[in-house]
Image (cartoon, rainbow, N blue to C red):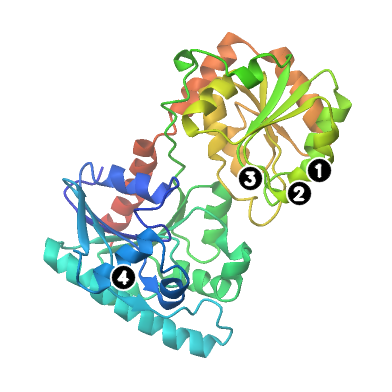
Amino acid sequence: MIKNRDIVIVGLQPWDIEIGSNCKNIAVEFARNNRVLYVNAPLDRFTAIKQKDKVNIKKRLQIIKGNLPEIEKISDNLYNLFPPCKIESISRLKSNYIFDFFNKRNNKIFAKEIQKAIIKLGFKDIILFNDSDMLRSFYLKELLKPKTYVYYTRDNLVSMDYWKVQGERIEALHMKKADLVVANSTYLSSLAKQFNPRSFYVGQGCDVSAFKPEKVTAIPEDIKNIKTPIVGYIGALLTVRLDIEIIIHIAKQRQDWNVVLVGPEDEDFKNSELHQLSNVFFLGNKNGEELPAYLEAFDVAINPQVLNDLTIGNYPRKIDEYLAMGKSTVATKTEAMSVFAEHTYLAETKEQYVTLIQKALEEDSDEKKRARIVFADEHTWENNVKQIYKYVSDFENNM
């Protein structure tokens, strides 16, 4: 446990982001026993022009003009900084020399505003925790001189087009100079070890408090009359992440099973053969609070993940939600899924999906359900942060 320290967090997602965020959850957990400054990314000129009519951009522009305070208090120990500055939009620059010149300039502008906030709040001997902000924060270790600098990797970002131009080069250098790297999947920690031997798997937090079978009082109308067994998936239906062919194969091979898909579809899913199959049901997007009731209606939950550079190392948070409801789960076998191996069925082919779903139906029991729930309940943000504390403490004790 680390207590009574000052922690500064930088990352890709601002505090006022509308979706869930690992980094925000970690910040809240840090703030239980430490003072925390959560730093929003600085506004870049392209965004300032392109999105000037958005409410959150208008707010940032007012802060830059000095019309609103740059530091907001979130709770007793947690503060949010809106850096009152603009930086250049440079991520697509192909010349390493030109990129490095402007990136160092951007970092200096950013660091100056963070340093002002550090002084204003009276922070000392900071731990600087970087949530994958590989470019804008590349020089912050040198500029802010933290006692400990932690780089956090939770997605294989350099596989994405936006990061490919400079990200592959810069993130490797970033990991190399960090005091330690922590990762939310075993796959990503293995990648990081190529650049920094002090790279560690720290697990993933997940708030599964809503995903409790006893909290479900009624099955939704649009699923309760679908005949069992129901094989279901909950989440965005995106072909960059899911293998449509696996789902088609399951539905065609076992027409006595009903396949239920809950979530918004991309164009490939909308135009897929799945819509022509009588035992496949698309129920559309649902509010987060509705999801446990849909999951309760499943006999087997699936995660037919497509294997690519983006997905192979991701920690699948939905698996925790499936298991928290006690559901038999069949998922694509990846290194990241190895931590779930004892409580899930892992398939390598579409044929194995059918075999393992049948096995999951046959082997399900109250004892297995209880074991899945207990396992999922271990994946708390508290336990996640305890692992981060452990490696930070080990590093500082051996400095």
Q: Residue furthest right?
A: 253
Amino acid bearing label 3: Glu
| Image coordinates for residue 259, horizontal then vertical, percent | 74, 26
User: How would you rate the neighbour count of disc 4 (Cα within 10 Å): few for under 14, some for 14-19, many for 20 or more?
Assistant: some
User: How would you rate the neighbour count of disc 3 (Cα within 10 Å): few for under 14, some for 14-19, many for 20 or more?
Assistant: some
Question: Which residue corresponds to mark 4?
Answer: 61
Eye-nearest disc, 2 or 3: 2
Amino acid bearing label 2: Asp
The quarter of the image holding the N terminus is: top left
Any part of residue 149 in sight: yes
> CB of mark 2 within 8 Å of CB of mark 3?
no
| Image coordinates for residue 40, horizontal then vertical, percent | 33, 62
Amino acid bearing label 1: Ser
Question: Alpha-carbon distance for marks 3 and 4?
Answer: 43 Å
Question: Alpha-carbon distance for marks 1 and 4?
Answer: 44 Å
Q: Residue at x 80, y 24 (%)?
A: 279
* Mark 1 or mark 4: whose residue is earlier in sequence: 4
Q: Quadrant of residue 235?
A: top right
Q: Residue at x 58, y 48 (%)?
A: 314
Question: Which residue corresponds to mark 3?
Answer: 335
Q: Residue at x 26, y 67 (%)?
A: 146
Q: Residue furthest top?
A: 366
Give the vertical position of 287 relative to 148 (above or below).
above
Tag 4, which secondary structure? helix
> CB of mark 1 within 8 Å of CB of mark 4?
no
* Mark 3 or mark 4: whose residue is earlier in sequence: 4
* Mark 1 or mark 3: whose residue is earlier in sequence: 1
Identify the disc placed on residue 272.
1
Question: Which residue corresponds to mark 2?
Answer: 268
